[in-house]
Image (cartoon, rainbow, N blue to C red):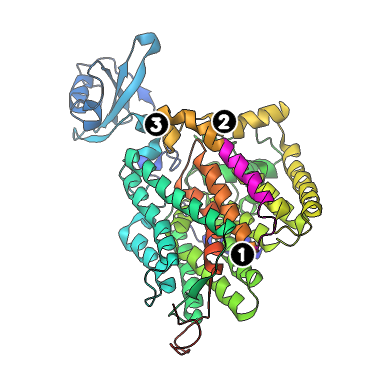
Amino acid sequence: MLIAALAALAVALMAPAPAAANENFANEPPFGGELPPPLVKPPSERRPPAGFELSGREAIRIADAAGAVRAESPEMRAIAFERGADWQVSYFTGSVGSRTEVARAIVDDQTGQVLGAWHDHQLDAPLARGYSGAIAQKVNAPYVWLPLCVLFLAPFFDPRRPFRLLHLDLLVLLGLGVSLLFFNRGEITTSVPLTYPVLGYVFARMLWVGLRPRDRPGPLIPVLGVRWLAIGALVLACGRIALNVADSHVIDIGVAGVVGADHVIHGQELYNGNFAPGVGIRGDVYGPFNYIAYVPFEAAFPWHGHWGDVPAAHAAAIAFDLLTALGLLALGRRLRPGRDGRTLGIALAFAWLAYPFTLYTMNANANDSLIAATVVGAMLVLTSPPARGAMVALGAAAKFGSAALAPLFATATGERRWRSAILFAVAFVALTALLIVPFLPNGGLHEFYDRTLGYQASRSSPFSVWGLAPSLDFLRPIVRAGAIALAFAVALWPTRKTPAQVAALAAAVLIAVQVGATHWFYFYVVWFLPLVLAALFVAQRGEQLSRYSSPAGPGSAS
């Protein structure tokens, strides 16, 4: 509740964003609530409509020169529509009864300029169009992103061991930014394939750490004093909050959480197909706990039906982010005793706050840090089977993919394995049922599945290799079956696991599930990031060095 109060206070000073005077594609769904103007067929293509400078035919001639249009079939048929004060030229193939739109261009009526032109995946997926800063705004700017990359790596860089494996691990995590660079340019045929080497490397490393744990020489924080790292973490936390308040939009994910919380507070159904009429989102795709988690923030900042002013989503995103950072701070103390635990906790919290993609997620006001918080919570209560069963259930009842962690956390470290598994299962099933059953629609579990997990599993998305390259789809059932097999295999072997091994194997399971998913996006990194950081940082067993310790002291040998 303290975190919720701090987040609510942080956004209390936010003023509603003024409505844009002209259409801005980056303010339309899924980025914002500015709905596009309706399309109107002009009475004539030869003469300009009233108030227009261009005719429909002139708009088509201008649109024909756009690169995205020229890349499509020469057999296309163009139709011009009035789109507010501008023109939309849509290009179709096929007969009138079964025509398919294959390209689109928006033409400014006053200047004759092409404001936007799209084809292929970009037609149905605005995320693929490369609008500058549409997601997370200034977080994408080099003057924000690159300093964060330096901060994420610098405290853990050991100049005396430049080739230690931790350096490579952290660099690979930062390497996902190369994919984001192409995504921001709208080049998803490059950005999507570039995500998989990163996911593959981290998956392999986590599987190796989980199955073959090994202490690494050298201190975790070789040069910088821990006190300075703690100060840095505090500065980063404050800076993140300020940036969220001053420069962030709420994408459809955050709006869905707030609208669902409004339904919960007013006793309305979540999954009746009438989730947010007039808002332009389909938000009933998550589990009930996702919406319940937004209730305190929606109660403080009620939903008024306007996407452009959703302070509750800002407050929730800030709270989920800070809660994860504080959880990591506490996790360090659980993983190591005494001063070493304090150092580890500060390092984990700092790394979370410095990693660019956690800020990217928070500044988009997405809900994925809620899953990170539940994962960290499960690690914090690892010694209590019912408690960890409850934490995994909370995550699974928010976003279903995290349910894959249930087998591993059921057996956890392997102590009294079967007794622990039974206690875990009772808590997991009981809480999951308690969260889901009261919100079941009239069609029961079948309709609930269709509206949530079934919809997500069956929808098309160009942001995974399966959507971008349908010819590879025959491999997807194999990948998914492998993820399920892995989830159960690591629950049974090794029979005894340290908490760090549990963290590593849990990260591997989450990555395996994500690789087999229909849709993948950069927000999903925060699901497994806390586990990866914990597994990597615990392996560094060298004594902490600071400017107060002797360079020739313990831990200085390579």
Q: Would you call the spot at circle 2 few (<14 residues within 10 Å), some (14-19), or many (20 or more)?
A: some
- Residue at 53 percent across and 47 percent down: it is 511
Which residue does the image show at 46% across and 40% down from the upper left?
33
Task: Find residue 149 and report its horizontal and vertical position in percent.
Answer: 38, 63
Q: Name above or below for residue 442 compared with residue 510.
A: above
Which residue is tagged 1? 327
Find residue 213 and report its horizontal and vertical position in percent: 57, 63
Q: x%, y% of residue 413?
A: 70, 59
| Helix, strand or loop under label 3 | loop
- Residue at mark 3: 469
Tell me the magenta residue range. Answer: 481-498
The numbered dot on residue 183 is: none
Mark 2 is on which residue type? Tyr
Q: Nearer the viewer, mark 3 or mark 1?
A: 3
The residue lying at 69 percent from left, 37 percent from top is 268
Amino acid beneath label 1:
Gly
Answer with the quarter of the image where residue 335 lies: bottom right
> In terms of secondary structure, where does tag 1 sit?
helix
Q: Is residue 161 visible?
A: yes
> Observer-nearest residue: 333 or 310?
333
Mark 3–mark 2 Cα distance, whole angstroms, equals 20 Å
Q: Which residue is mark 2?
A: 455
Q: Earlier in the sequence, mark 3 or mark 2?
A: 2
Q: CA distance from mark 2 to mark 1?
A: 32 Å
